[in-house]
């Protein structure tokens, strides 16, 4: 398994078939893992360095 430091969901809210509650997902990630969720709004961006 990989253990990412950060996760960014993509494609949520783009059409009804895959409608999800991104905030609830982020809370679940925070509670169940040590990974930091980053939920972006349209037009937001995040810089990732490796």
Image (spheres, rainbow, N blue to C red):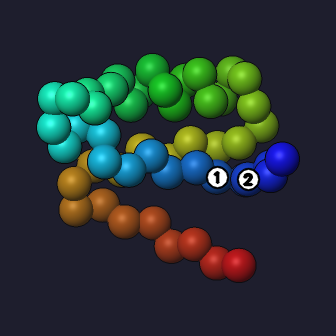
Is residue 17 rendered to the left or right of residue 32? left
Q: Nearer the viewer, residue 44 or 3?
A: 3
Residue at position x 30%, y 40% from top? 12
Distance from disc 1 to disc 2, alpha carbons, whole Å, reads 5 Å
Binning the other alpha carbons within 10 Å of mark 1 as few (below 14), some (14 to 19) or many (20 upward) gives: few
Residue 44, x across and y down, in percent: 30, 61
35 is higher (above) or lower (below) than 8: above
Where the C terminus falls, by quadrant? bottom right
The residue positioned 51% from the left and 73% from the top of the image is 47
Badge 1 vs badge 2, beta-carbon distance below 8 Å: yes
SS type, badge 2: loop
Residue 14 appears at what percent x and percent y? 19, 43
Is 34 left or right of 29, judged from the image as shown?
A: right
Residue at the spot of label 2: 4
11 with respect to 4 (left or right): left
**Which residue is denoted by mark 1 in the rendering?**
6
Q: Residue placed at 73% from the left, 53% from the top?
A: 4
Quadrant in the picture for residue 29: top right
């Amino acid at each position: 398994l990989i253990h990412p430091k950060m996760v960014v969901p993509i494609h949520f809210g783009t059409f009804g078939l895959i409608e999800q509650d991104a905030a609830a997902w982020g809370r679940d990630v925070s509670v169940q893992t040590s990974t930091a969720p980053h939920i972006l709004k349209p037009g937001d961006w995040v810089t990732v360095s490796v």
